[in-house]
Structures are given as structure tokens and as C-alpha cells.
Amino acid sequence: PTRAPTPPPTLAPVVGPSPPPTLSPTSTPPPTPGPTATPTPPPTTAPTPPPTVQPSRQPSHSPSAAPTSIRSVLEAILTSFAPFDGDKRRAMDWLVADTWEPPADASDTTSLWEERFALAVFYYATTGDGWSNNDGWLTA
């Protein structure tokens, strides 16, 4: 347990995954014996923008704060399907390894990823490798 209080819960749902936990306990500096000379800045009123669902096609001008893998992006999009085990894990592994991307002009890429994932889960759950005709399944 930490000695400092935990932050209060957010009022609105947070979009995107939370940061991973630290590997070792964290510590906070001890309180100062008296008030500091300068006050802390006030909190901002605007929330931070949500992450983009699909990676950009062009590199950004500055590096990202943290590396993003296609798996973490897909897990954020497909969070309602969690946990990713068994046939869902196999479908997720296939999506990560596949080179397919939603069309650039698609207005709802989340639905396209969900449909593709659901069909891959169906394929694995019904032993699609053993179907007498499985042509075109698990292809871009």
C-alpha cells in the first residue's frame, strides 16, 4: 500500500487502455515541513484527446510517448470480446500477423475489425482447417 491517497475515480468512462502497472512499488517524496513558496498550477479543463483507432499512414513529426503495437490497438478495439483465450486467442494472433487494413475511406473501422475477428473466431471454433472447402478463409 502507498501512503498517498489514490486519485479519485473519473466521472466519465475513459477511452482506451489504462497504463500498465509498475513492476515494483512506487514511493512518494515525504511532505514538506511547511507550505511551498509557489502554488501548483491549476488542473486543465479540457480532457486529453482519445487515441486514434487506426495507425496513421504517414509518420508523425515527433515520437510517440509510448510504443503502440497492433495487438494493443486491436485489444482496445475488441475489448468487448475479452478475455482472449482459446479460439479467440488464435483469432487475435491471426489478426496481428495478417497484413489486412481497413480501407482508407471506411467510416467505421471498428465494425470492420469486429467482423473480421468474429469470423476468425468462428473459423477456429468450428475447426475450419478441417472443412472440406475452406478456400478464402483467413485471407486478406
Image: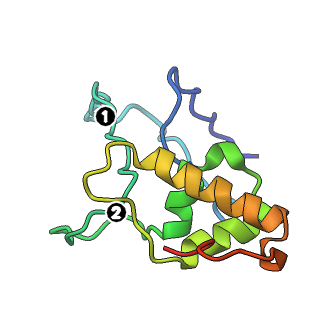
Q: Residue at the location (79% across, 78% down)?
A: 129
Label 1, residues with CA under 10 Å away: few <14, some 14-19, many ≥20: few
Q: Secondary structure at mark 1?
A: loop
Q: Residue at the location (43% across, 33% down)?
A: 34
Location of mark 1 (residue): 40
* Horizontal and vertical percent position of residue 107: 32, 43
Count of marks, rendered view: 2
* Horizontal and vertical percent position of residue 55: 34, 62
Q: Amino acid at mark 1?
A: Thr
Give the CA separation, mark 1 to mark 2: 36 Å
Q: In this rendered view, identify the residue nearer to me: 15 or 1.
A: 15
In the displayed structure, does residue 101 sit left or right of residue 127?
left
Q: Residue at the location (84% across, 78% down)?
A: 130
Name the outermost residue toward the left: 61
In the displayed structure, does residue 67 sit left or right of residue 135?
left
Q: In this rendered view, identify the residue nearer to me: 74 or 38.
A: 74
What label does residue 25 carry, if any? none
Location of mark 2 (residue): 55
Q: Earlier in the sequence, mark 1 or mark 2?
A: 1
- Establish if 68 lies above or below 7: below
- Establish if 27 lies above or below 97: above
Name the outermost residue toward the top: 11
